[in-house]
Amino acid sequence: MAQEYSRTQRVADQIQRELAALIQREVKDPRVGMATVSAVEVSRDLSHAKVFVTILNGGEDQQGMTESVKALNNASGFLRSQLGQRMKLRIVPTLRFHFDDSLSRGNYLSNLIDQARASDPEQGSKVE
């Protein structure tokens, strides 16, 4: 059976695709670097959108991450106007960018699991 999506989810998916292309092609700020749009959450009335981004280069230090997010928030008006031209919406959502740290948290948890398996003396004797 086909899975049904709400309108807000369809709009969020379309915004994610459009913003990914816009950030890559149109944003010229060097502070942004290689930003990837990982998720978009849109309010029910479609007036606000939380955009979660992952910064690939320069994302190792906290200052680089905050500068990249700040640069994207400064460019949110431009990005919103470009979204309005590309999408046929009555109201284009206000964009707020947030850093998505799920990648770094995933790496941290993976390292913890690897450490726990390495310290287990019976690791080789048990078959999962």
Image (cartoon, rainbow, N blue to C red):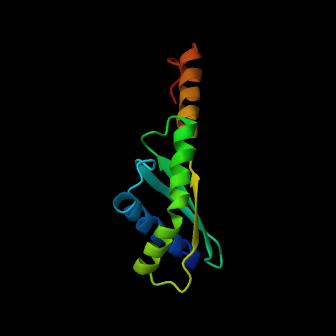
The mark tally for this picture is 0
Q: Viewer-proximal residue, 105 or 74?
A: 74
Q: Is residue 103 visible?
A: no
Question: Residue 17: which quarter of the image?
Answer: bottom left
Identity of the residue drawn at 54% across and 18% down: 118
Return the residue found at the far right: 44
In the image, what residue occupies the spot 54% across and 22% down?
126
How far from the left and from the top, in percent, is residue 58?
Answer: 45, 39
Give the camera-side residue of 59 and 12: 59
Task: Give the answer, above or below, for where 32 lies relative to 48.
Answer: above
Estimate the x, y position of residue 50 in percent, counting from the top left.
60, 63
In this orientation, which residue lies closer to the viewer: 18 or 108? 18
Q: Position of residue 42 (x, y in %)?
A: 60, 70
- Residue drawn at x 65%, y 79% is 45
One can see residue 62 in this view: yes
**To which quarter of the image does residue 86 belong?**
bottom left
Instruction: State whether residue 104 is above or below residue 100.
Output: above
Query: Measured from the top left, where is residue 70 in percent x and y?
Result: 56, 52
Q: Quadrant of residue 112?
A: top right
- Reply above or below: 105 against 95: above
